[in-house]
Amino acid sequence: MAEPVLTIEHLTKEYDGQTVLKDVSLQVHEGEVIVIVGPSGSGKSTLLRCINALEDIQGGEIRLRGQKITAGAKNLPQIRQKIGMVFQSYELFPHLTVMNNILLAPMKAQKRAKEEVQAEAMALLTRVGLADKADSLPRQLSGGQKQRVAIVRALCMHPEILLFDEVTAALDPEMVREVLEVILQLAENKRTMLIVTHEMPFARAVADRIILLDDGRIQDDTDPEEFFESPKTELAKRFLQSFEYTRTRKSDD
Ligand code: ADP
Ligand code: MG
């Protein structure tokens, strides 16, 4: 198999002497969609933040296309450009229009020509149904629209991998679907993605692999069919029960 896009080996992360990620190893290959699930506090966000070097790590190694990711290293800004991250809170600049929010990083960090990025941004905004919002300010958008802008902004950087951390958790129910549909589209286009979500039918639909994180450890790493239909571990069974996820809901999505 080709070299993985992302390799995590024996990652350990501590906060104030408390170990929150324990010997986490994981490979993500090109075009693969991995969904990370797990109870609150199990370390999902911390894992994504370590990948983006928003956190320093106490053990192990993270590599993107073979390049080691180290917090504070000289080459970090350049590696980070290849990692697109979308958070629960959209993190759009409130004083900039949608278009200028999207243009900022490609022009500043990647020194790309405005016209080129603008054309790409417009095409992507059109694809997510927001062509008419290019000149709007974030506060004029709904949560679902803001989140779609955040996804377009990440895509415009041409990342090698996209990280999503509970991007629908803050949205009203009617807006969840419009955002998940964009991510499903990205999966169909073979985007490499690592997705943290509590939306179980979505996880099942989008994932090539499901990883169950509990207490900072990978407890299960399996294909979605097995994870949802015949979970092997007690933890997986209990986790799914906590969602009251039953076979009858299979037709939901
Ligand atoms: P999840 O995203 O799965 O809910 P987190 O990665 O946010 O879990 O948190 C994992 C553990 O790390 C939790 O026990 C949390 O309290 C702790 N933690 C997260 N961020 C910090 C921080 N900045 N300082 C100290 N502890 C933290
Ligand atoms: Mg979290």
Image (spheres, helix red, strand yellow):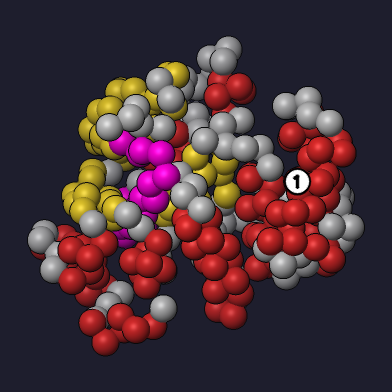
Residue 209 in sight here:
yes
Residue 139 in sight here:
no
Name which residue lies at 86% across and 36% down.
114
The magenta stretch is: 27-42
Query: Magenta segment: does it hold 142?
Result: no
| Residue pointed to by mark 1 | 120
Query: Magenta segment: does it hold 33?
Result: yes
Q: How many marks?
A: 1
Q: Foreground residue, 77 or 252? A: 252
Name which residue lies at 32% across and 54% down.
208
Q: Foreground residue, 11 or 188? A: 188
Mark 1 Cβ and ligand 2 under 8 Å apart? no
Looking at numbered disc 1 in the image, what kind of residue is underneath it?
Glu
Q: Foreground residue, 163 or 16? A: 163
Kindly indicate the quadrant of the structure image that contains residue 57: top left
Residue 128 lies, with reference to residue 42, above or below; the image says below
Q: Is 91 placed left or right of 62 in the picture?
A: right
Can you give x and y, in whole percent of width and height, for residue 24 in the image?
26, 36
